[in-house]
Amino acid sequence: MAAAQSYPEAARALARRAGEPIVLEGIVTAADDLGPDELMLTRFIVTCCTADATIAQARVVGVTPGAFAPDRWIRVRGRVFPIGREVLVAAETAEAIPTPDRPYLTP
């Protein structure tokens, strides 16, 4: 998913998976253009050190408005729909989780 936001071939590969089930864990982040039942789910990717960190984000739709505050870790189960460079997840469930032992993704 993260590669699809930067690399056309990865974006095409993700597009072929449109509608498939997905489980994501990340931090709730705010954005000005979100609807009341939407949130941004963010995860940091660190390849070598924090100086090279990048982010992967998905717009999650269909969550209970106000259920999750920014900076809260959650797990979302739903279906993935890549739209251009944006990844949209239609949530089927969303639940608060503790901060993972390894909060940063490393390839």
Image (cartoon, helix red, strand yellow):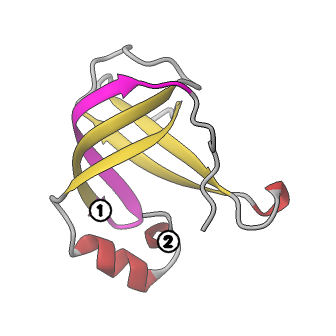
- Disc 1 target residue: 82
Image location of residue 58, percent across then percent down:
41, 49
Q: Please provide percent x and percent y for residue 60.
A: 33, 39
Q: Quadrant of residue 36?
A: top left
Task: Find the magenta span and give its range.
Answer: 82-98
Q: Residue furthest left?
A: 19
Residue type for callout 2: Ala
Q: Is residue 54 visible?
A: yes
**Which picture quadrant has residue 18?**
bottom left
Measure the alpha-carbon separation of dots 1 and 2: 12 Å
Q: Which mark is residue 3?
A: 2
Q: Between 72 and 36, which is closer to the camera in this rendering?
A: 72
The furthest residue to the bottom: 9
Figure quadrant of the N terminus: bottom left
Using the image, determine if residue 71 lies above or below residue 10. Answer: above
Query: Around disc 2, counting alpha carbons within 10 Å, would you say few (fewer than 14), some (14 to 19), or many (20 or more)?
Result: few
Residue at figure coordinates x 25%, y 55% from the top left: 80
Q: Left or right: where does residue 45 sit relative to residue 4?
A: right
Q: Is residue 80 above or below residue 35?
A: below
- Secondary structure of residue under mark 2: helix
Circle 1 residues within 10 Å: few <14, some 14–19, many ≥20: many
Check whether the beta carbons of the residues at disc 1 and disc 2 lie within 8 A of each other.
Answer: no
Give the main secondary structure of the magenta stretch. strand
Residue type at mark 1 is Pro
Q: Identify the residue at horizontal 30%, vertical 62% (top origin).
A: 83
